[in-house]
């Protein structure tokens, strides 16, 4: 920024192609730094440490010289990205948690990177270095309107809302999410929930809850 507080230039970002930058997140852990951006034309751009392959390049190679297109709408039937989140913590053994989530205008949630606790929604805990569409009990899931992530010292949990107003959880079986017969068991696919306790990481969900209150009262 040269001390001006203004974005001067970043290699890999093309305003004519990508549009305005609407969201920026920089994550820094002890041994890992990542940068992710969402643009008005529905692209997701990223750079940095690529542990677990969150950059969606089919590898785990670190990229620090230029931004990469993590999500290009033209590769996904021109379904533009409308929201993205990247986990910003590390495992208890010091390894970084690198997982990215992308919500599209078509109501899909894609994920890429670390699969700990099943947070990629593939009914497994395996990593993926390419984007995968998150699943519920019936397979690839659509109809999502919003989501948020919560990251603990070594875990990640996501909650999301569907167009029918139902709430769902994915990933670590955190104590803050209960109800509907759910327990502390990790959720390897989206699982409907009926109760959300705002505990240690619950503050991360506050905006999502208030925005989606018309879908039903939240207690």
Image: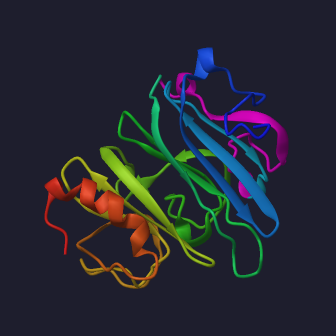
Is residue 209 shown in magenta? no
Residue beneath the point at 50% across and 24% down: 41
| Residue sitting farthest toward the top | 16
Where the N terminus falls, by quadrant?
A: top right
Q: Nearer the viewer, residue 21 or 160?
A: 21
Number of marks present in the image shown: 0
Residue 167 vertical placement versus 108 (above, below): below
Task: Please provide percent x and percent y for residue 58.
Answer: 74, 42
Where the C terminus falls, by quadrant?
A: bottom left
Question: In the drawing, does residue 188 fall left or right of residue 115?
Answer: left
Task: Please provide percent x and percent y for residue 150.
Answer: 49, 68
- Is there any visible trace of residue 180 in the rendered image? yes
Give the image quarter of residue 114. Answer: bottom right
Give the image quarter of residue 2. Answer: top right
Give the image quarter of residue 151. Answer: bottom right
Question: In the drawing, does residue 140 fall left or right of residue 128?
Answer: left
Question: In the drawing, does residue 46 fall left or right of residue 21?
Answer: right
Residue beneath the point at 82% across and 66% down: 31
Residue beneath the point at 47% across and 22% down: 78
Q: Nearer the viewer, residue 135 or 21?
A: 21
Is residue 73 shown in magenta? yes
Q: What are the residue bounds of the magenta stretch?
A: 52-77
Residue 139 vertical placement versus 74 (above, below): below
Q: Nearer the viewer, residue 181 or 217?
A: 217
- Is there any visible trace of residue 137 in the rendered image? no
Task: Please provide percent x and percent y for residue 94.
Answer: 77, 76
């Amino acid at each position: 920024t040269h001390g001006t507080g203004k974005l001067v230039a970043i290699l890999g970002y093309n305003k004519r192609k990508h549009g305005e930058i609407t969201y920026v997140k920089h994550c820094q852990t002890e041994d890992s730094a990542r940068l992710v951006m969402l643009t008005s034309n529905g692209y997701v751009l990223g750079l940095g440490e690529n542990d677990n392959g969150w950059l969606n390049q089919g590898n785990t190679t670190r990229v620090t010289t230029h931004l990469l297109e993590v999500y290009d709408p033209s590769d996904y039937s021109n379904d533009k990205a409308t929201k993205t989140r990247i986990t910003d913590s590390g495992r208890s053994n010091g390894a970084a948690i690198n997982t990215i989530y992308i919500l599209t205008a078509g109501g899909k949630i894609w994920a890429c990177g670390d699969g700990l606790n099943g947070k990629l929604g593939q009914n497994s805990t395996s990593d993926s270095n390419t984007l995968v569409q998150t699943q519920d009990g019936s397979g690839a899931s659509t109809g999502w309107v919003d989501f948020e992530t919560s990251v603990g010292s070594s875990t990640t949990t996501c909650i999301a809302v569907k167009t029918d107003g139902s709430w769902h959880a994915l990933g670590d079986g955190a104590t803050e999410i209960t109800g509907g017969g759910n327990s502390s068991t990790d959720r390897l696919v989206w699982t409907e929930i009926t109760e959300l306790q705002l505990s240690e990481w619950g503050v991360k969900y506050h905006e999502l809850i208030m925005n989606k209150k018309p879908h039903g009262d939240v207690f």
